[in-house]
Amino acid sequence: MAASTVGLVEEEAPALRPPPDVPARIRGEHEQLRHDLVHLVRDAEHAESGEPLAVERLRTRALDVLSRLRVHMRSEENALAPLLAAGDPWSALRRARLRTDHERQRAELAQLAVVVTAPVLVATELTPRLRRFVDELLADMAREEVDLLHVGLGDGEVPFDADDDGSGEVG
């Protein structure tokens, strides 16, 4: 039997508000990831010697860090969506930027995972790609902390380059 809606006034749902600890949690995750990414690059540099134990340590750490990055991105998107929608006049641009950055990063993670899980891991080929990816990721995290975790700016203020599509290309 269907419930009756006679007499009920349909109200607009209140805006979802994230817990106040969301920015702090994401910053904390970024700090841990920064630490892990720096160690991952060090492991890659050490594995360039070809020492079997160093190569396996690199493979193990890389698989762990790549997996945690995927989880972090999903968690970050879920946590920031309501935060960015809560009265932020630039929320559509911010969400698009986050989505674009994460799509690019997921594609690179997939490519790195192929290299890392190959039967023969060639650290001398992986290390430059890993360094480049880590440098870009660290810059993206810093930008996210400014652009996305500092919501609540006055109308009209744009704390990021609205014309920057996040591709890393200039002009």
Image (spheres, grey):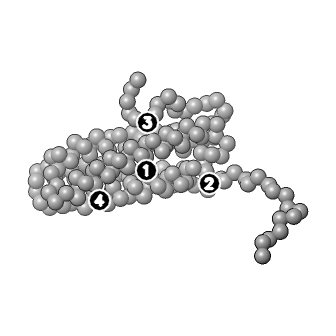
Q: Which residue is mark 2?
A: 18
Q: Earlier in the sequence, mark 3 or mark 4?
A: 4
Whether residue 94 sits left or right of residue 36 in the image: it is right
Tag 3 secondary structure = loop
Q: Which residue is mark 3?
A: 166
Q: Residue at x 51, y 51 (%)?
A: 77
Distance from disc 1 to disc 4, alpha carbons, whole Å, reads 18 Å
Residue 156 can be seen, yes or no? yes
Q: Which residue is mark 1?
A: 30
In the image, farthest residue toward the bottom = 1
Tag 1 secondary structure = helix
Q: Residue at x 33, y 56 (%)?
A: 65
Tell whether label 2 touches label 3 (CB within 8 Å).
no
Tag 4 secondary structure = helix
Q: Which residue is mark 4?
A: 63
Residue 55 can be seen, yes or no? no
Whether residue 163 sits left or right of residue 2 in the image: it is left
Residue 29 lies, with reference to residue 138, above or below; the image says: below
Q: Residues within 10 Å of mark 2 (few under 14, many from 20)?
A: some
Distance from disc 3 to disc 2, alpha carbons, whole Å, reads 25 Å
Tag 2 secondary structure = loop
Distance from disc 3 to disc 1, alpha carbons, whole Å, reads 18 Å
Percent of width and height locating residue 98? 48, 43
Residue type pointed to by label 2:
Pro
Percent of width and height locating residue 1? 78, 76
**Front position among marks 3 and 2:** 3
Residue type pointed to by label 1:
His
Distance from disc 3 to disc 4, alpha carbons, whole Å, reads 25 Å
